[in-house]
Amino acid sequence: MLSRRLLRIKVIKELYSHLKSESDSMTGSLRNLTASIDKTYELYHQMLELIVEVQRYARQRIELGQKKRLPTKEELNPNLRFVDNAVVAQIADSKPLADYLAKCAPAWNDRPELIKILYNDLTASDFYRRYMEAGGHTYKDDVQLAENFYIEIADNCEALEEAIEELSIQWVDDMDFSILMVLRSLSMCRAGQSLPIVQEFKNDDDRRFAGELFRSALANYGDYMKYIEKFTQNWDVDRIAFLDGLIMVAAIAELINFPTIPVKVTFDEYIEISKYYSTPGSSVFINGLLDKIVEELRTQQLINKEGRGLM
């Protein structure tokens, strides 16, 4: 399922887009937010299919080698371990995956060079060589090969990252999240069973989370910015990075409006997000400022958490 960190990032990005475009339609921005989240879930499905495309390419190479006028001994008796990989077969045979992808634009069909690059990177790797040369192998070995493909090859392939960003602007920064979801599916695979498809949301709370966070942050943007201004009186507020302000506004919205999320979780999540999505040093600045804002909100009794230990 999509992590709450990803949902928080999507909310911050949509807040940025909404405010920078000076949009007056919260409904339209909420639709964009939902579409962006759904696109990440689509990327998870497309990434599952990726190793199938690489396997097909490997099979085509074997078939072409066997059709040569003077094939080599290796071409006549190829190592079929990868093309017969059981977990890749599960992915290829998954009807739910095929049904989902049938509703989407093809991602890899017109990118043979990308598939070739991934195949070459895979076959050049040490883990692939060990897998292919092992005296015997198990279903667990097949799963490990697939996991290594995504961790070692896909996640480090610049050509793949570029292709993903070209396919959809909404997929910028989503590759790592989609790979984590693929790895979760692979971890749940069992021999002789159908491919486990990870659900988009863990539960109804997660399904509602992004929309509710966006609404509360946008509707109270001016009020929440006042907390930031209060503790930056000696600063030129205009010089505070716009994205830093959005991150803190989203954090304040979550602290006030989500009673079941512990303060520490909210605090830590937005600090981590700032490390990757804002300016150098932003995390230290936001850490110190949020600490003061949390104390202020507690003093005003605006943080009311449900359950033991949530403060």
Image (tube, grey):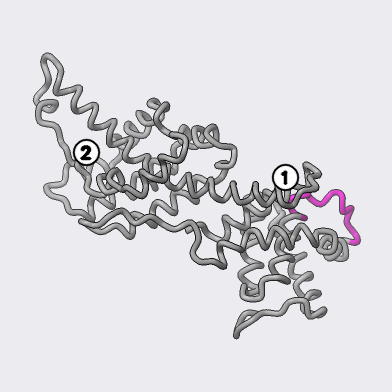
Dot 1, how many residues are within 10 Å of its Cα: few (below 14), some (14-19), or many (20+)?
some
SS class, disc 1: helix
Q: Position of residue 15 (x, y in %)?
A: 72, 51
- Residue 208: x, y in percent? 60, 63
Q: What stretch of residues is rendered in magenta? A: 233-245
Q: Is residue 308 magenta?
A: no
Give the residue type at disc 1.
Ser
Picture coordinates of residue 141, whole percent (x, y)? 23, 52
Q: Which mark is residue 83?
A: 2
Point out the image quarter for the C terminus.
bottom right
* Residue 78 in sight from this viewpoint: yes
Image point (87%, 54%), residue name:
237
Label 1 – label 2 distance at C-alpha:
45 Å
Q: Which residue is mark 1?
A: 17
Residue 7's place in the image compared with 292, above or below, is: above
If you read the primary sequence from the N terminus, does the residue marked by circle 1 or circle 2 appear first?
Answer: 1
Q: How far from the left and from the top, in percent, is residue 209?
A: 61, 63
Q: Which image quarter: residue 122?
A: top left
